[in-house]
Amino acid sequence: MIRVGVMGAAGYAGAELARILLSHPDFELALVTSNADEGERLDAVYPSFVGATDLAFSSHDDPAAYDLDAIFLALPHTASMARVPALLEHGVTVVDLSADFRLRDAATYERWYGVPHACPELLARAAYGLPELFGQGLERLAAERAQGTPALVACPGCYPTASTLASFPLVASGLTTGAVIVDAISGVTGAGKRASTRTHFCSANENLEAYGVGTHRHTPEIEQNLTDAGRGVQQVVFTPHLAPVERAILSTVTMSLSRPATTDELLALYHEAYDHTAFVHVLDGSQPRSASVAGTNNAQLTVVADARTGHAVATCAIDNLCKGAAGQAVQCANVVFGLDERRGLAAIGRAV
Amino acid sequence: MIRVGVMGAAGYAGAELARILLSHPDFELALVTSNADEGERLDAVYPSFVGATDLAFSSHDDPAAYDLDAIFLALPHTASMARVPALLEHGVTVVDLSADFRLRDAATYERWYGVPHACPELLARAAYGLPELFGQGLERLAAERAQGTPALVACPGCYPTASTLASFPLVASGLTTGAVIVDAISGVTGAGKRASTRTHFCSANENLEAYGVGTHRHTPEIEQNLTDAGRGVQQVVFTPHLAPVERAILSTVTMSLSRPATTDELLALYHEAYDHTAFVHVLDGSQPRSASVAGTNNAQLTVVADARTGHAVATCAIDNLCKGAAGQAVQCANVVFGLDERRGLAAIGRAV
Amino acid sequence: MIRVGVMGAAGYAGAELARILLSHPDFELALVTSNADEGERLDAVYPSFVGATDLAFSSHDDPAAYDLDAIFLALPHTASMARVPALLEHGVTVVDLSADFRLRDAATYERWYGVPHACPELLARAAYGLPELFGQGLERLAAERAQGTPALVACPGCYPTASTLASFPLVASGLTTGAVIVDAISGVTGAGKRASTRTHFCSANENLEAYGVGTHRHTPEIEQNLTDAGRGVQQVVFTPHLAPVERAILSTVTMSLSRPATTDELLALYHEAYDHTAFVHVLDGSQPRSASVAGTNNAQLTVVADARTGHAVATCAIDNLCKGAAGQAVQCANVVFGLDERRGLAAIGRAV
Amino acid sequence: MIRVGVMGAAGYAGAELARILLSHPDFELALVTSNADEGERLDAVYPSFVGATDLAFSSHDDPAAYDLDAIFLALPHTASMARVPALLEHGVTVVDLSADFRLRDAATYERWYGVPHACPELLARAAYGLPELFGQGLERLAAERAQGTPALVACPGCYPTASTLASFPLVASGLTTGAVIVDAISGVTGAGKRASTRTHFCSANENLEAYGVGTHRHTPEIEQNLTDAGRGVQQVVFTPHLAPVERAILSTVTMSLSRPATTDELLALYHEAYDHTAFVHVLDGSQPRSASVAGTNNAQLTVVADARTGHAVATCAIDNLCKGAAGQAVQCANVVFGLDERRGLAAIGRAV
């Protein structure tokens, strides 16, 4: 068994990691940390774990972390990069769910996150963990790890995962022109575990609202991904929304077409991009439902050509905590440790 | 008292009309019709009316309709235009909530609705019922009605109400260029009362999905409204979404700016357009929450300039059944009958 | 106009009071207080008030309270009784929504609330504000107030309102025997505005749970009410539950019958008790739906005889914030000020 | 691999069976039937299966059923008993999720279900599938099946599963007296897949209501189970409720104690009953949350002594579709086929 730990396991992404890892056939969850809940049992904080584990939280400073094969870091940005160098030095592979190693350019990081990067020299070492589109970086890490070098995976944000999957094949084809318009809707787990007016049931329920218009930090990450499609610098107008569901990202990406194209022609691009993957499924003639992927590492997506206006509208649904965070992190860890990427990841969502 | 009736009162918009009209100080609700529920009491179909009315449904063919001062038509499209000519001939003012008289061009109607218009000669007579932007038409009807000519109001669709309010001032200013991207989210009442797989609690709950991509019939209505802003023909890429709330439209409109502009400059346009109105409120520095307008005839909206990409993002929240249907219909009826437009319409939504 | 204020207007019951009072034809809302939100505008804290008021919160110590005709106290228990004596001394009528003056016996108060009562001499002066069953006390206050003595109304708790309405007529008939079993379900507004793990959307949504089993402080209040039915001391086994709705109490009361009885016979008792009231509606042959009374001051209830087991099951639905708190408080204030009890209170809930 | 099929797989319990069986390491799902959806792919009806199976529905009359090792019958009552004899004759083990073989007394069946039993001679052969309390029957079936006799399992109803688990240890101890009061709350999946006014999102959402008061058909099943506890005939007053969650039963059982007892004493009875089981977990000092068991075969429960009134209140949470239907059916099938009862059943629910 590969011995792993989760730092920040009391948060939502961390708890989802614990859920997956406790059932994983190859990973053994040996450590969960939380400064706020230090000493508490995991099943006291989250009763869904009753009967499944006796683990209790230790603090983030628990030196036991250094004895593990890998650490999943589910800490806020800046807290994450403060711990990565020491973990790597101790030979621990790091799968980081924060934003700290996603942007390759330290200046862009500073512009959007408001702080200088603490270890910019590690940015080139990290690989971006979206296996279906950027698998080479993970393969590089796997090869290095096999030679004894601990890996550093920068797991994508939830919005960038869905938005990039939705638009990358079309942008890469060169068929798009102008800014990419991303309107995406998130479930409330995306706002994190902290209790606030915004996450109060009576505020979030029966309510729809946009937030962070023009300023959301996932914007440069989507732009980096789409620019990596090789068709020039891509600008993204990104508007996130909050809706009263627990786990979901539905990303709707509107792109101007540089020449007329049919829906079938566009769908063919997506099938070519994704039909060989385990988790990304292209729908023909129906729209993705976020409920169909909740609790799974799957993405479902489709694209429609609006011939009348010369635009394409691509939509992608994922579970923000799973394919958008913990599930994808485990998928990346599987790759880095040379396992089948599907190990330990549920294939089928609840029908209802 | 002005004696009115609601045809199609068993549907959601019809029931909301009944709720408002039963409390209206100047209108007396004298007739509710439903072919499916003929003979049933209103409070048996909707127990919220228990203790408030003894009304029972008669059929749509009840000749009592011809003795009323006004009929609110909450029927599906085509069913509506089948009844309008006879009502007008009997001197009954018609406030039509269907799509049948919204589009001024019969050919556009036929293209999007798939049937020829039954009475195209009435299209010019109708006035479009969005008082804050197109009040002159309603004033014309009020003047004609005062002279004895029954009025015909074409009430806007729910998506067009929110989307037009969100974008009209900016389009009218000439600051926009290119297609207008409208991504809007509706509550489930927007799908109507008919029980179906899609409206089943267990399908709609915890789910987000787009639908009708590129084909939704509200598209030409938004285009007509924005083209009426006088800055050339406007094309709209419209993607509606469904989210698990009961009453809401949140419309997010992304527009490309023809020159740099600040958020303050854009907000000034919106304040100028709406500060004199009773129901449309411009928010400075916060995003509209659909929960804040649920159950009311209010719209809350704002606009943000994304200087980095040269776009503006305007957002508007309404209650799809109220400002998006029944409330706006009563507002229009108030105007047509020479009353204060606020009569009988709740001013304050539930804080929670 | 009768000039009134709300202390604790930033909480949910307080905000609901503000919503009702701002539209009330006879009351003028002149003061809203909140220590935490002092200086903030009401419409900044609750955007549903945008366009409806310019009121801003002052502190609870604002001396302007002493110049008003009445204060609605929406403060926690103990905070409430700390302010009542001074208000009364200044001639201000107090409508108290806390628990401080509900229990007539100071020792019972101390046993359940864990603190001695601060002004037990006022307990006899207060009247319990459930007008449909205990109207005489309020009539006494109205008469005293007309003579210049400020009134003190102790508004019932939400659970006691629904549970007492559901069971009082049957207990009063002498047909019941043994303990009264009350299982009730509350919406999340009942847990108050404070953000906590329990009220986080992702904890409360898709979850059902009981709480406070055997210890909930509304228990002695229900017992006092049912004992007042005059059939001996009544013991109540009360189990409250939380469900993911915003505004609701559904109280299900199971009582053992002392002799066989039919549903019709039981319903007749309820009709006799409530058919003359404005807000309490007895349903024949259907079960109350909490959605039908949400946002209103109505209660809907019914009773069923289970002949097989010799029990009766009565059910009552109210809106916990309205009939269970703010609406009933305004109803009581109407009575105390000699107005029609229905003034300013919406009669019809949303059909959907 | 043991080859199995699901009849009635288009319903909610059937789809949940398909979800579990498609991931089961020992069962191979070879047949799914639905008369209404014959010819449709499973993943077209439920998109959560996209990428996981190519199965399509055949009709209930598909003779392929007779070649399988076992059939899970997720058909309505009466439809189920019409098919059981032929399946058994063909040597097919039947795990029946309907009510048809739960009640051992055919006369009781006829009284509550309104039709005579079609094959009363099979009632004694069937074993009731609540392994934690009635495991001997299933062991008998396993032994018989090993000798070549196909098994017939009568899976419990969802309410009886939760209500029996909650109260059996206490009833069996002899500490209770008088009628057992069961108030239970179900999620909307319990109302089945059929679209109706009652299951429409806009009816079920934000609503709480009781239904079937005094008449619900799960009543005699709970009574049979509790009478099997060996402390005399038990009468149950059962009131089910509907709340806006998808998957949940929360059963609250109030019992009169025949002598004073402490919570600790009662909890000890429950620990003794359940600590050796895989799926039933007794909570000390906290109340079960239905969210913690959703999607799993777990039950969480606790009991509280209300010394003041001499009652005990036991509460149990399960997922109505899983431990209350499909999960428990697979658990029973595991036992009957000699497998570990946990095979293929998720142990850990979502933390959020």
Image (cartoon, coloured by chain):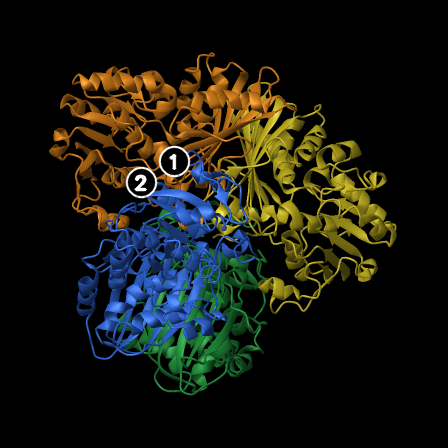
Chain colours: A blue, B green, C yellow, D orange
Q: Residue at x 38, y 57 (%)?
A: A88
Compared with C107, A90 (above or below) is below
Q: Position of residue D58 (x, y in %)?
A: 16, 40
Q: Earlier in the sequence, mark 1 or mark 2?
A: 2
The chain to which mark 1 is attached is D
The circle drawn on residue A152 is: none
Choose top left, top right, bottom left or bottom right for residue D88: top left
Would you call the spot at circle 2 few (<14 residues within 10 Å), some (14-19), or many (20 or more)? many
The chain to which mark 2 is attached is D
Q: Secondary structure at mark 1?
A: loop
Which residue is labeled 2 in the image? D12
Q: Secondary structure at mark 2?
A: helix
Quarter in which the N terminus of chain D is drawn = top left
Mark 1 and 2 residues: CB-CB less than 8 Å, in contact? no
Which residue is labeled 1 in the image? D320
Q: Is residue C127 visible?
A: yes
> How far apart in space, not on screen, are marks 1 and 2 (Cα)?
10 Å
Closest to the observer: B71 or B290?
Answer: B290
On whether disc 1 and disc 2 are found on a single subunit, the reply is yes
Q: Is residue B63 visible?
A: no
Q: Position of residue C277 (x, y in %)?
A: 65, 43
**What kind of residue is marked 1?**
Asn
